[in-house]
Amino acid sequence: MAKINGNEIRPGNVIEHDGGLWVAVRTNTVKPGKGGAYNQVELKNLINGTKLNERFRSAETVEQIRLEMKDFSFLYEQGEALVFMDTESYEQLELQKDFVGDRAAFLQDGMMVTVQLYDERPIGISLPDQVTLTITEADPVVRGQTAASSYKPAILENGIRVLVPPFIGSGERIIVDTNEITYVRRAD
């Protein structure tokens, strides 16, 4: 593990602080008129999700944690658990649905995900940024409705509701952003 100075903490860095694992969400270098400069860091606990604002001076050092990133393939859903397979060792990993969150609805058979591990324990998961899905239900276009927003609600094959342009109809395949849960474009 590497030690870094408090002024070197950047968003995305994982550090050990007060006996816990924290990820830096936002950083801001503050140079007050009186006294030394410091780095104001917004931290989020990787285990329980609590947030903390902390000041780090350049003379302070913290342990920067290196997380192991492993590729897993999504296999199937079993009750409240999601089962993934390590693409190298073929070992299976079970994660609870609430660990993945709302984005669990975007998981498809064979989808590749990246799991962040610390001491062989999963602490984070990232899905592909975009997935292709079919629209099962879309409202018809109302003629002359150009003054209002030109997007209409549609329901995807996984049950998620998104807003799509009026020219998109039921049965069409679209690309959806899994982070923002928004329509990106029509699938080719």
Image (cartoon, helix red, strand yellow):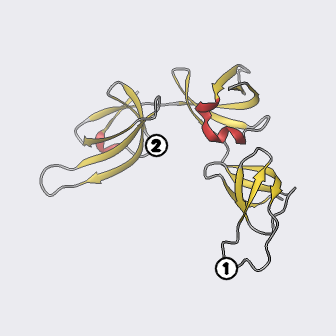
Can residue 104 be seen from the camera position used here? yes
At 51% from the left and 30% from the top, the residue drawn is: 67
Residue nearer the viewer, 68 or 16: 16
Residue lying farthest to the left in this orientation = 34
Instruction: Give the quadrant of residue 77.
Output: top right
Look at label 2 and name its amino acid: Gly
Can residue 70 be seen from the camera position used here? no
Residue 12 disc label: 2
Look at label 1 and name its amino acid: Ala
Relative placement, left or right, of 10 versus 135 is: left
Residue 80: x %, y % from top left: 68, 26
Residue lying farthest to the right in this orientation = 171
Q: Quadrant of the C terminus?
A: bottom right
Instruction: Tell me the crowding category of disc 1: few under 14, some 14 to 19, or many 20 or more residues within 10 angstroms, Cα based.
Output: few
N-term-proximal mark, 2 vs 1: 2
Which secondary structure lies at badge 2? loop
Residue 115: x %, y % from top left: 61, 32
Relative placement, left or right, of 66 versus 131 is: left
At 78% from the left and 56% from the top, the residue drawn is: 174
Residue 27: x %, y % from top left: 36, 49
Instruction: Tell me the crowding category of disc 2: few under 14, some 14 to 19, or many 20 or more residues within 10 angstroms, Cα based.
Output: few
The residue identified by callout 1 is 147
Residue nearer the viewer, 127 or 134: 134
Residue nearer the viewer, 103 or 23: 103
